[in-house]
């Protein structure tokens, strides 16, 4: 539905699902690290403002 609203039409995934899951997990690990760093930075700055 979202792809239709954005007028992006991708062909269905025909690859190996295990490979796709590994790639997603690898990318999500990077995203999680970034979010943890942002949260840490926010906590440090918030402590300084008090």
Image (cartoon, rainbow, N blue to C red):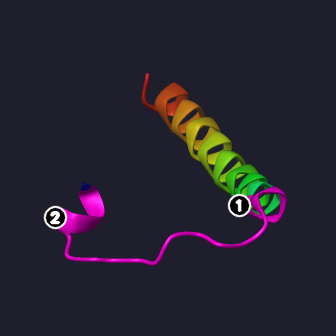
Question: Toward the viewer: 9 or 30?
Answer: 9
- Left or right for 32, reference 4: right
Query: Which-is-in-front pick, marks 1 and 2?
Result: 2
Query: Could you tell me how far apart the alpha carbons at marks 1 and 2 are, in whole angstroms?
Result: 25 Å
Q: Residue at x 59, y 69 (%)?
A: 13
Q: Give the residue at x 60% y 45%.
A: 35
Q: Residue furthest left?
A: 5
Q: Secondary structure at mark 1?
A: helix
x and y percent of residue 20 in the render? 74, 63
The quarter of the image holding the N terminus is bottom left
Query: Residue 6, relative to residue 31: is it above or below?
Result: below
| Relative image position of residue 9 (x, y in whole percent) | 32, 77
Q: Give the residue at mark 2.
A: 5
Q: Looking at the image, is mark 1 or mark 2 earlier in the sequence? A: 2
> Is 8 one of the magenta-colored residues?
yes
Q: Is residue 14 magenta?
A: yes
Label 1 sits on residue: 27
Please give left or right for residue 7 compared with residue 21 in the image: left
Mark 1 residue crowding within 10 angstroms, few (<14) / some (14–19) / many (20+) = few
Q: Position of residue 10 (x, y in %)?
A: 41, 77
What is the secondary structure assignment of the residue under circle 2? helix
Magenta stretch, residue numbers: 2-20
For the C terminus, the quadrant is top left
At x 66%, y 40%, the residue is: 36
Using a 10 Å C-alpha cutoff, classify the residue at mark 2 as few (fewer than 14 neighbours), some (14 to 19) or many (20 or more): few
Label number found at residue 1: none
């Amino acid at each position: 539905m979202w792809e239709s609203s954005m007028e992006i039409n991708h062909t269905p995934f025909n690859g190996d699902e295990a490979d796709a899951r590994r790639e997603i997990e690898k990318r999500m690990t990077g995203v999680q690290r970034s979010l943890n760093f942002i949260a840490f930075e926010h906590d440090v700055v918030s402590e300084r403002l008090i």
